Image (cartoon, grey):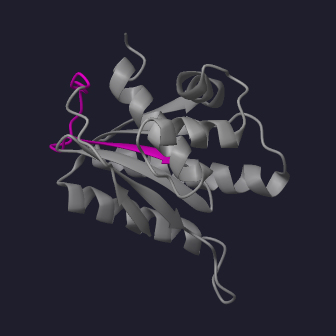
Amino acid sequence: MNMHPSPIPVADLSPVHVASACAGSTILALDLGTTTGWASLVNGIVHSGTATFRTGRYDGGGMRYLRFQHWLEQLADDSGGLASIYFEEVRRHIGTDAAHLYGGFLATLTAWCERRGVAYQGVPVGTIKRFATGKGNAGKEAVLAAMRERGFQPADDNEADAIAILLWAMETRGGVL
């Protein structure tokens, strides 16, 4: 897993109030996929990175989802608990394999959140792109450039998307404003 703390605290943004049964206060944003981009707000500081859930030669089909679940548990434990999770809500996939993988990650995520009492919300792709770049149909490079303009150094488009989701959740209070 790659991790990149933000260059500056995000104390300038108004605090997010999220109702949750979970004792934690960390907000997590995810761009689900074999290479999952993630960004979290912990004690006023944004952390981000990517995690890869590829299967090995001798792995069964469910191993990537078990690894993803274990990774979520580790993130929750390391951050003192999660208050909420926002994820990119993809409605259209280029290929069947991508759709199946996304569905597996989404099912694993939502079941994990339900078990742990963590609030979760999907954010449409167009909403994320419009927030980040001003255009709902912006390309991956535009979102990457927009996050760099905000002072972040995402390694790839997965991490950039996760940062954009997190910033959207913080600035709109999860779309409540």
Quadrant (top left/top right/bottom left/bottom right) for the C terminus: top left
Q: Residue furthest bottom?
A: 58
Residue 79 is left or right of residue 152, and the answer is left
Q: Is residue 28 above or below residue 60?
A: above
Q: Nearer the viewer, residue 43 or 56?
A: 43
Q: Nearer the viewer, residue 129 or 110?
A: 129
Rendered residue at 62%/62% (across/down): 34
Q: Position of residue 11 (x, y in %)?
A: 20, 32
Q: Is residue 162 above or below residue 70?
A: above
Q: Position of residue 153 (x, y in %)?
A: 46, 51
**Would residue 177 be counted in the magenta stretch?**
no
Q: Is residue 13 above or below residue 154?
A: above
Rendered residue at 71%/33% (across/down): 91
Image quarter for residue 78? bottom left
- The residue segment tinted magenta is 13-30
Rendered residue at 53%/58% (across/down): 155
Quadrant (top left/top right/bottom left/bottom right) for the N terminus: bottom left
Q: Nearer the viewer, residue 71 or 115?
A: 71
Specify whether residue 142 is in view: yes
Q: Position of residue 90 (x, y in %)?
A: 66, 37
**Would residue 28 be counted in the magenta stretch?**
yes
Specify whether residue 107 is in view: no
Residue 57 is left or right of residue 177, and the answer is right
Q: Main secondary structure of the magenta part?
A: loop
